[in-house]
Image (cartoon, rainbow, N blue to C red):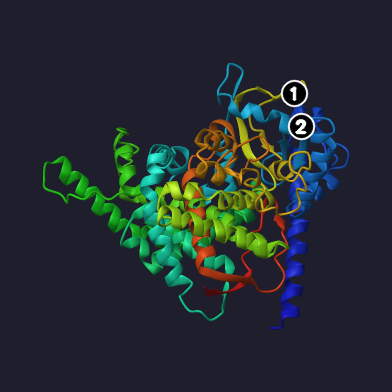
Amino acid sequence: MSWVQNLLYFIVGVAIASFGFINIQLLQLKFSQRPALWEKLDAVCPPPEYCPPTFALNVASSIIFTRKFANEGYRKFSKALDRPFALLTPWVRGSTVIVLPPSKIPLLTRSDKTKDGQWTNLHGLVETTQLAYVIPDSNIYENVLHFDVVRRKMMAPEDISRLAPVIADEIKLSFREQWGTENEWKSINGWDGCGKIIARAAQRILIGLPLSRNESMLETSRQYATSLLVGGAIINCFPPSIRWVVAPLISLRARHFQARYVKMLLPLVEERLLTRLAEKGGEQVPEEVPDDFLQWMLPICAKNKDPAQNQLDAHRIALRLASLLTPLIFAVCYVFAHCVVDIHSSNARANILAGLEEECSRVSAQYGGLTTSASVDALKRVDSVLRESMRISDVSVTNIFRDVTAGEVDIGNGIRVGPGVRMVFPTQDIHLDPDNYEDPMRFDAFRFSRSFENEYEYKHQGSKNRAEERDSERELITTTTPTFLPFGYGRHACPGRWFAAQVMKQALAYLVLNYDVELIGPPPKRRALLNMMVPPVGVQIRMRRK
């Protein structure tokens, strides 16, 4: 069958699906009532009361035009009027979310529960990947005790310091094995090449040696992480009323890789549980206790005494570890791969690489390598280039979700939001706002480090106090501000960002010092699928060992 026939079949399929989608939207409008709340909100597109067919068509078109609609609403309402606006999307029931203006970001610092109402960030996170269609055990994503492990073991400076040499060791070995040591140019898929490095580092911390280096395990974890998020994005393009039909089909790939991953992981989990039981029973056990996420999680699981939940069930523990693969692998790879693309597609590529290599060489010589958290913390330009890439190459159009679950939440402007309504922030537009960043559409690699370049001189001239004072003023990749929101903000800012930053900085530093890289062809155009910015999965690079 020729590609022309395939294209025709695809177009016909899309046309039929679009027709069905619009008709489902019209039926929903006919038999459902929209809350009076929406009448108080500005909107980019006309509400259903004006013309139901147009409303349904706009909801369907948001699959492609969410980025355009959000940008228009930000300019017209968030910026000009400092007001929230309604954004159409098939993602939620009612086909609309509230986009809050930047002035409402301080709301994220308040308690989730107040005397008037309650909201949660969990529903939006779960529905981004549609975990309910992939993980049959709802306890995994409703009782997120694995996040407690992140907070206790992956946030404190001493924890990051302990993990730094382990990450450095894994990154060095994975680059040598995956990218090679030849001095001849060779071509690879950039997304896969970056993903394999990140997957190795993540798995080493997640489950430890030797299983973390099993090639089948690594590839399965990487494929699962990607298929879960991409599958969730596709499922969200369909109205909630028909997801029960399409979601099981779309999630087949993610469920396949999840089953493979859990099957490979179960023997290790069972072994750890048996060792724990033996230790509790006073039996002799190996003196060296594994220092990985699986081991850290067991005491926290054991604290739950509810027999109905049985948090020490081996299969449940394996599923918890699987649920972490998307933030640990896909999300970190997304930033790392985009950073490589952003550097090598910049007009200032040569200067950026020279600046990074000079810093990495100098700091490595000063600290005897880049295997400690102190040495990695000294990589100011590396930190800046990653932060700048996260700013300009956002993973989504809107982010920081809040769903009202009880009572009413007062968001000002005389608007009170009741249960069942999702609120989001226009994070991409905030990051690209000229009022927040000078020349925001330009990738300025050293935007966040340039004004601190003299710190090295201060320290070597004996101005320690001045250097420390300047250090406290810097905005690091882990610093969340009202104008830098990739890791969220306030009470539920990402607790794993210190670990993610450590991995990305060590990986980028090793790449800069040891490999020449060039993009093959033009840089990929950024496209949105509903709310998700599609990752550069097709980007090709050529590289060689220096």
Residue 322 is left or right of residue 306, and the answer is right
Q: Which mark is residue 135?
A: none
Q: Are marks 1 and 2 in contact (CB under 8 Å)?
A: yes
The one of 330 and 543 positioned closer to us in this rendering: 543
Marks 1 and 2, the one that precedes in the sequence: 2
Q: Is residue 441 above or below residue 337?
A: above
Give the farthest residue toward the top.
115
| Element marked by disc 1 | loop
**What percent of the width, then of the height, locates residue 330?**
53, 56
**What percent of the width, then of the height, locates residue 244?**
59, 51
Q: Residue at x 30, y 43 (%)?
A: 298
Circle 2: residue type: Pro
Circle 1: residue type: Ile
Q: Which residue is mark 2?
A: 84
Residue 286 is left or right of residue 268, and the answer is left
Q: Is residue 251 visible?
A: no
**What percent of the width, then of the height, locates residue 460?**
50, 44
Q: Residue at x 66, y 26 (%)?
A: 418
Q: Which residue is mark 1?
A: 415
**What percent of the width, then of the height, locates residue 446?**
65, 51
Give the farthest residue toward the bottom.
1
- Quadrant in which the N terminus is drawn: bottom right
Cα distance in 3D space between marks 1 and 2: 9 Å
| Element marked by disc 2 | loop
Nearer the observer: mark 1 or 2; the answer is 2
Residue 116 falls in which quadrant of the image?
Answer: top right
